[in-house]
């Protein structure tokens, strides 16, 4: 089957407004970025809500359409603020649902969200590609957290971890017609990095990657060459910048056709002047403070944005 050509950049994103946000103990073992908060559950939720609303407002002010859906109080889904882990939307009208490692994240998958886009907002949903059955075998693939998609060249970059496993990756690749480029990436202490999108982002012309985290020289060289071969200028990040969530940025399309690069304030502050200049030559940079979300949940701006590539009726 020949798939419809897809833009790399989305001009619309889905965001889930938190109701009971807090640090999730079931994800702490594999996500070494989370848990650096002493705030109570109520304090975490209140701060996260303020940060979420600020990010929504600023994205809209900069010309990105934002679809906001409220989380539900029950079941308790402390990480629902990160919808890109359970769903992705594609230009041919397909919606992919993903297998999640933590049991209390699996209930984030909500068909009412898909139905809202289809029936109320008049997006075309042609098919649901449900990969969640891989959970039964203990095989996980957490959406565009586990994979960084080059949608134009149909390449899925994926660093392997307990949350990103080959069986589910192969199923995605076959059903969605993607080439998969897998590699091993570790933090400065040698522990596997849980999600690919904390160490790299692929935009239209620019790619950002913490290549020093790729432990095997041959894999590192092959990935950098693949990015160059697909026409991307590369910004290389350090471990310090990785830990400040600089890899967790996302390039978007604005209503006037420009490029917007969204990231957290912590991520922006970690970048050098030269790196900022490279980004600014590529598009407008938007940085928003989400310190509580990052400290509590170990995810940043890119994790909060599920790009909507579906066609409109």
Image: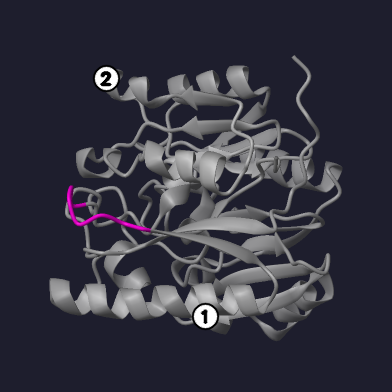
Comes first in the chain, label 1 or label 2: 2
Q: Position of residue 195 (x, y in %)?
A: 45, 48
Task: Please tell me which residue is depicted at 17% across the width and 51% down the height of the picture.
Answer: 74
Mark 1 Cα-neighbour bin, 10 Å: few <14, some 14–19, many ≥20: many
Task: Please tell me which residue is depicted at 66% across the width and 45% down the height of the picture.
Answer: 309
- Residue range highlighted in magenta: 70-76
Marker disc for residue 37: none
The residue indicated by pointer 1 is 288
Label 1 to label 2, Cα distance in Å?
A: 38 Å
Quadrant (top left, top right, bottom left, bottom right) of the C terminus: top right
Would you say residue 303 is visible in this rendering?
yes
Quadrant (top left, top right, bottom left, bottom right) of the N terminus: top right
Picture layout, residue 101 above or below residue 278: above
The residue indicated by pointer 2 is 136
Query: For residue 286, which quarter of the picture?
Result: bottom right
Q: Position of residue 204 (x, y in %)?
A: 79, 54
Task: Please tell me which residue is depicted at 61% across the width and 39% down the height of the picture.
Answer: 157
Would you say residue 215 is visible in this rendering?
no
Q: Position of residue 101 (x, y in %)?
A: 29, 37
Magenta: main secondary structure:
loop
Q: Position of residue 192 (x, y in %)?
A: 39, 46
């Amino acid at each position: 089957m020949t798939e419809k050509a897809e833009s790399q950049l989305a001009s619309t994103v889905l965001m889930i407004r938190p109701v009971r946000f807090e640090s999730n103990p079931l994800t702490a073992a594999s996500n070494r970025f989370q848990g650096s908060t002493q705030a109570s559950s109520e304090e975490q939720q209140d701060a996260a809500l303020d940060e979420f609303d600020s990010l929504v407002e600023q994205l809209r002010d900069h010309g990105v359409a934002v679809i906001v859906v409220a989380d539900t109080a029950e079941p308790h889904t402390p990480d629902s603020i990160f919808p890109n882990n359970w769903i992705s939307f594609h230009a041919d009208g397909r919606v992919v649902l993903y297998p999640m490692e933590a049991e209390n994240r699996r209930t984030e998958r909500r068909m009412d969200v898909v139905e809202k886009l289809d029936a109320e907002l008049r997006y075309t949903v042609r098919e649901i590609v449900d990969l969640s059955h891989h959970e039964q075998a203990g095989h996980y693939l957490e959406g565009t957290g586990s994979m960084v998609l080059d949608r134009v060249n149909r390449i899925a970059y994926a660093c392997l971890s307990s949350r990103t496993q080959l069986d589910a990756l192969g199923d995605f690749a076959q059903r969605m017609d993607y080439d998969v480029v897998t590699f091993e990436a570790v933090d400065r202490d040698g522990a596997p990095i849980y999600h690919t999108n904390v160490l790299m982002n692929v935009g239209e012309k620019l790619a950002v990657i913490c290549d020093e985290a790729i432990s095997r020289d041959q894999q590192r060289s092959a990935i950098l060459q693949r990015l160059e071969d697909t026409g991307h200028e590369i910004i290389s990040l350090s471990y310090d910048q990785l830990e400040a969530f600089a890899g967790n940025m996302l390039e978007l399309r604005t209503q006037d056709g420009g490029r917007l690069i969204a990231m957290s304030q912590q991520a922006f502050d970690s970048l050098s002047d030269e790196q900022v200049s490279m980004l600014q030559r590529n598009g407008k940079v938007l940085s928003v403070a989400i310190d509580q979300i990052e400290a509590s949940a170990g995810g940043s701006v890119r994790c909060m944005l599920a790009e909507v590539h579906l066609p409109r009726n």
